[in-house]
Image: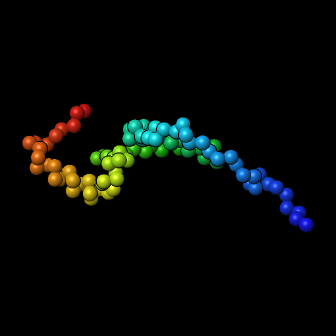
Amino acid sequence: MNNKTTSQTDVQQPPIDFSNSVRGKHAQAYQRGYEVVVHKMDGTTEVRDFAMPEGSVVLAPNVRTYFPNAEMVNRALRGLIDLLPQPVVAPV
């Protein structure tokens, strides 16, 4: 005879429906940086700021297929540098 009772963890949850999800929904906000407020057990809070390092670039998934790491991206861009008449200055 099994005396084990069914606990909350023994119940199987229904599958999560991701059909209405949006890929990259928060990508622009992530690139701008974000703030996390940590609420500690002692009642205090700590604010932590996170931002991508200067010069970071996020590749689109279809581009990442061809250039999966920084070495390959830099190699391709160096090949294009000779084709440019002068350094391109990004708009501010």
Residue that appears at 20% across and 51% down: 77
Residue furthest to the left: 85
Q: Quadrant of the N terminus?
A: bottom right
* Position of residue 4 measured from the top left corner of the image (x, y, whole percent): 85, 61
Residue 34: in sight, yes or no?
no
* Position of residue 78 measured from the top left corner of the image (x, y, whole percent): 17, 53
Quadrant of the image occupied by residue 16: top right
Q: Nearer the viewer, residue 36 or 90?
A: 90
* Position of residue 67 measured from the top left corner of the image (x, y, whole percent): 30, 54
Q: Nearer the viewer, residue 76 or 48?
A: 76
Residue furthest to the right: 1
Q: Give the mark count.
A: 0
Q: Quadrant of the C terminus?
A: top left
Give the left or right position of residue 5, taking residue 86 as reference: right
Give the left or right position of residue 16, taking residue 50 as reference: right
Q: Nearer the viewer, residue 44 or 36?
A: 36
* Position of residue 57 measured from the top left corner of the image (x, y, whole percent): 31, 46
Q: Nearer the viewer, residue 39 or 22?
A: 22
Residue 52: in sight, yes or no?
yes
Residue that appears at 8% across and 42% down: 85
Residue that appears at 32% across and 48% down: 63
